[in-house]
């Protein structure tokens, strides 16, 4: 039974992610569904804790499995990417008017182009993982990737906590904090992809030549 606990925690993360999305769907900036916004924060934190716990238990009990290696990063991406998509959506939109032109500002500090950058990085690393493992080579997580995941998991609930409970249209400092956190997250996300970009050279050196084909 103990061998299945890490995998159960991994699957629970998807359940918590679904509940998180459902709760967040009932919130709209700045004052609709504040209760559900705070429920969503709690659900995200619980889901993030299962992420740290399942890997720790799997290594400690030496029960690392192929199921965990596949599902753990998948569940992480569902939770984190889903959160960023929601944060860049209409529920966090601030409508401002200047010179009769409507400008759209995100209270969360997350804009659609940021989600594209984050998604592109994940797809890029996943593609390299597939090629590397197809060559029979191990593909472990790099420090930059772990730092990126930790920062994202911390930034999301902090931004939600600030936006839901202290609307940025009333507190300029909250708007500044949210934007700063998200720009830092984007910077670390891009930086974390550089080692993989450099690693492409190693993959290309292992391509079969015409003589090998």
Image: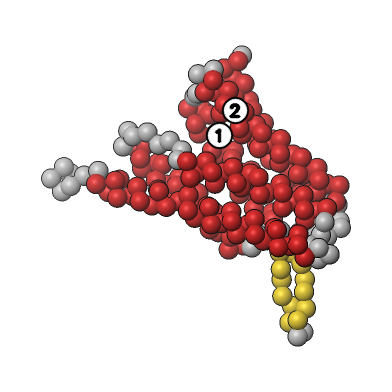
Coordinates of residue 62 in the picture (x, y in percent)? 50, 18
Q: Disc 1 vs disc 2: Cβ atoms closer than 8 Å?
A: yes
Label 1 neighbourhood size at 10 Å, few (<14), some (14-19), many (20+)? many
The chosen color scheme is secondary structure
Q: Would you place residue 210 above or below residue 68 in this image? A: below
Coordinates of residue 147 in the picture (x, y in percent)? 54, 43
Tell how many labels. 2
Question: Mark 1 falls on what kind of element?
Answer: helix
The N terminus lies in quadrant? top right
- In the rendered image, which residue does mark 1 sit on? 72
Q: Identify the residue at the far left of this view.
A: 211
For image coordinates 63% across by 25% down, the residue present is: 8
Q: CA distance from mark 1 to mark 2?
A: 8 Å
Instruction: Give the foreground label among 1 and 2.
Output: 2
- Describe residue 138's horizontal placement relative to residue 36 as left or right: left
For image coordinates 77% across by 71% down, the residue present is: 95
The C terminus lies in quadrant? top left
Q: Identify the residue at the far bottom of this view.
A: 99
For image coordinates 54% across by 20% down, the residue present is: 60
| Residue 50: numbered disc | none
- Describe residue 5's horizontal placement relative to residue 101 as left or right: left
- Specify the quadrant of the image occupied by residue 105: bottom right
- Specify the quadrant of the image occupied by residue 99: bottom right
Residue 27 makes an appearance in the image:
no
| Residue 54: numbered disc | 2
Question: Mark 2 falls on what kind of element?
Answer: helix
Q: Would you place residue 204 above or below residue 109 in this image? A: above
């Amino acid at each position: 039974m103990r061998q299945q606990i890490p995998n159960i925690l991994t699957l629970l993360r998807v359940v918590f992610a679904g509940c998180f999305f459902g709760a967040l769907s009932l919130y709209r900036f700045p004052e609709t569904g504040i209760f559900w916004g705070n429920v969503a924060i709690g659900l995200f934190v619980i889901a993030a804790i299962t992420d740290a716990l399942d890997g720790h238990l799997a290594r400690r009990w030496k029960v690392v499995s192929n199921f965990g290696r596949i599902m753990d990063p998948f569940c992480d991406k569902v939770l984190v990417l889903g959160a960023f998509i929601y944060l860049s959506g209409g529920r966090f939109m601030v409508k401002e008017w200047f010179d009769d032109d409507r400008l759209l500002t995100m209270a969360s500090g997350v804009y659609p182009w940021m989600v594209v950058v984050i998604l592109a990085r994940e797809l890029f690393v996943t593609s390299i993982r597939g090629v590397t493992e197809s060559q029979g080579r191990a593909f472990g997580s790099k420090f930059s990737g772990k730092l990126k995941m930790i920062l994202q998991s911390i930034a999301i609930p902090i931004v939600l906590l600030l936006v839901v409970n202290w609307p940025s249209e009333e507190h300029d400092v909250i708007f500044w904090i949210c934007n700063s956190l998200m720009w830092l997250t984007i910077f670390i996300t891009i930086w974390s992809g550089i080692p993989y970009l450099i690693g492409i050279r190693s993959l290309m050196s292992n391509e079969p030549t015409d003589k090998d084909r």
